[in-house]
Amino acid sequence: MYNLVSYITLLPLLGFLINGLFGKKLHSERLSGLIGSGVIGASFTIAAMMFLEMLRTPVEDRSHVITVFNWMSAGSLSINVAYQVDQLSILMTLIVTGVGFLIHVYSIGYMHGDPAFWRFFAYLNLFIFMMLNLVLANNFLLMFLGWEGVGLCSYLLIGFWHDKKFDTGGYKTGSATTSDAAKKAFVVNRIGDFGFLIAMFLIFNLFGSLTFEDVFSRASALVTAGDKTIFWITLLLFVGATGKSAQIPLFVWLPDAMAGPTPVSALIHAATMVTAGVYMVARCSILYALAPATMEIVAIIGVATALFAATMGLVQNDIKKVLAYSTISQLGYMFLGLGVGGFASGIFHVMTHAFFKALLFLGAGAVIHAMHEEQDIQNMGGLKSKMPTTYKTFLVAALAIAGIPPLSGFFSKDEILFRAFTQGSVVFWLIGWVTAGLTAFYMFRLVSLTFEGEERWGHDKHPHEAPRVMTVPLIVLAVLSIVGGLVGIPVSLGGGNAIEHWLEPVFERAQTHLSTATEISSSLEYILMAASVIAGIAGIYLARLLYLKRTEVATKLSTSFKGIYRLLWNKYYVDEVYDVTVVTPTVKISDKLLWKGVDVNVIDGMVNVTAKLTAGASGWLRRIQGGVAQGYALAFVVGVIVILGILILR
């Protein structure tokens, strides 16, 4: 069964090749959609079969490495295209293929009528192929191939409608196109990827291998906790994670990535790209356990990003921008869990977040589709009667992300907050708790302004429910958002925290190097849970009060605190600061110094001087070839005389 793992990755690649090479000639949306969705569904089926097989296998026999072929060998470096099938990789594979399949099916309806329908599905399949290589790889180089691949695919998909204008939220408004957003995502991710690349050099230099098992097994023997080299390795890996998973300071690309088609936003935010950094840190848990300073940095960046992004989400009016900042904030939660040593809790939140965030984005896409591309929630309202299925499923997702029990988000978010309190610090927990309240507030601000209250759209719009090909994935994801957290019910609530036990063997090495938390009484755990639920309920109540019953208070607050409102609306002016301190100086240096100074004056100057010298010498030599026979005879005679003279003098 485990030998079928290569088919999990090859099927999406096959779909990419068929649609990419022949999709335009097929002239059939149905066939292109069937091929694109079918290969992902087949990959999910194989992954599910492997998961069931793994359940029947003893714990010690659940990890397997399947080698496909030798990729490269140079000196002591040998890299195989090999896949590691264990509890962590199979869970991520199920998330990527399962949620990815639902997004593909939804896209059949959403992208209906697009002239490049076939190309869209080719790119989606390539995206899944790259992400599967990332999560299944058994070595850093193959992981990096998938890592770079999802970056390429995000560029292709974000800029799919390359000439379409989009609202940047106050920054260079009106001048940006989706191709600008794609370039921004690509460049910012390359900054983070450079850190990943340097980390790989250090890993090979220290351990003599890039294979996970070699590196992780040697780590405990070769490295002592707090070693400087392991600190730099883990920190540089985390730099890569901040780019891919949109954490401070490299989060700026993700809100602009909303310029792409909505299914792309769902795929990037829920099932693939942005969770890559979380997965990578979790996979390298033993390295991070040996670098406590880096783990503290991970926790600090995570909790700061969670709060930072949540505050920006409070004032956004673009339905997809609200969800974008929500994603950044939730990713911060995941890194907080990883940073305090709760590796399983971080991955648990990856899973539940995939369900409710995919549902939120696909629900937003259904709204945009019904409102004829309108994305401003101030121009919506009263849609729940027009789109009942979308409203109900969207409400489920909003309750889940708000942490309301017994939905999935409650269990995973509460587990992270519990770990932050017991294994981190009260400060981490407090910031996370405040962020939970803000999350509930901005999500129900979104629900209230979009689906409830008075209708604020014009007579030219006639919103209606999305077709079944779009609503069925919403219903499936709503069910998963409800029951998905049941695998993580804590012992204090009568559960066994099955997902933690499932992942325990993967993180066993790391846990041996981490200080275990002191015994916590059930009463304290109940108090922390109650506090989390109270924060969520308070956020929901306040949002509904301000945006449904006392709307004048919301207007008054935005006027009274105009400075703070403007600061949040302009996203703390981070884009503007980067533009002044990084982008503009880089462009000017490239223009004035590197291009006009070095390229034109030095390089082109040297080429031109060489050309002039060659032309001058050629012009002088050309005179010898005059075409006059007498001249050639004279040169011949003079040459003979010179040679004879030399011989006589010798």
Image (cartoon, helix red, strand yellow):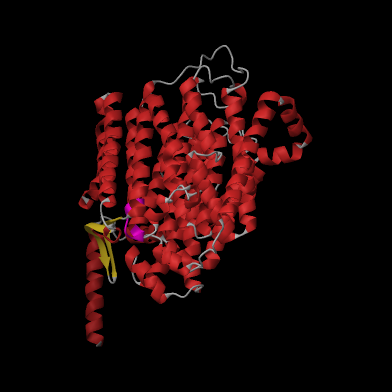
Q: Which residues are magenta?
A: 134-141
- The structure residue drawn at horizontal position 61% and vertical position 55%, both measured from the top left corner, is 428
Question: In the current view of this chain or complex, which residue is farthest to the bottom?
Answer: 650
Task: Work out whether residue 211 can be spotted.
Answer: no
Question: In the current view of this chain or complex, which residue is farthest to the top?
Answer: 459
Image x and y of residue 563, in percent: 75, 40
- The structure residue drawn at horizontal position 47% and vertical position 42%, both measured from the top left corner, is 353
- Magenta segment, principal secondary structure? helix
Against 621, residue 532 (above or below) is: above
Choose between 411 and 251: the one closer to the eye: 411
Question: In the current view of this chain or complex, which residue is farthest to the right?
Answer: 560
Is residue 34 left or right of 577 when viewed as pictured? left
Image x and y of residue 47, in percent: 28, 45
Image x and y of residue 235, in percent: 51, 63
Task: Work out whether residue 399 can be spotted.
Answer: yes
Image x and y of residue 271, in percent: 41, 42
Against 355, residue 147 (above or below) is: below
Against 324, residue 109 (above or below) is: above
- The structure residue drawn at horizontal position 26% and vertical position 27%, both measured from the top left corner, is 31
Choose between 92 and 393: the one closer to the eye: 393
Quadrant of the image containing the C terminus: bottom left
Choose between 243 and 493: the one closer to the eye: 493
Does the magenta portion include 402?
no
- The structure residue drawn at horizontal position 27% and vertical position 57%, both measured from the top left corner, is 58
- Number of numbered callouts drawn: 0
**In terms of image quadrants, where is residue 127?**
top left
Does the magenta portion include 139?
yes
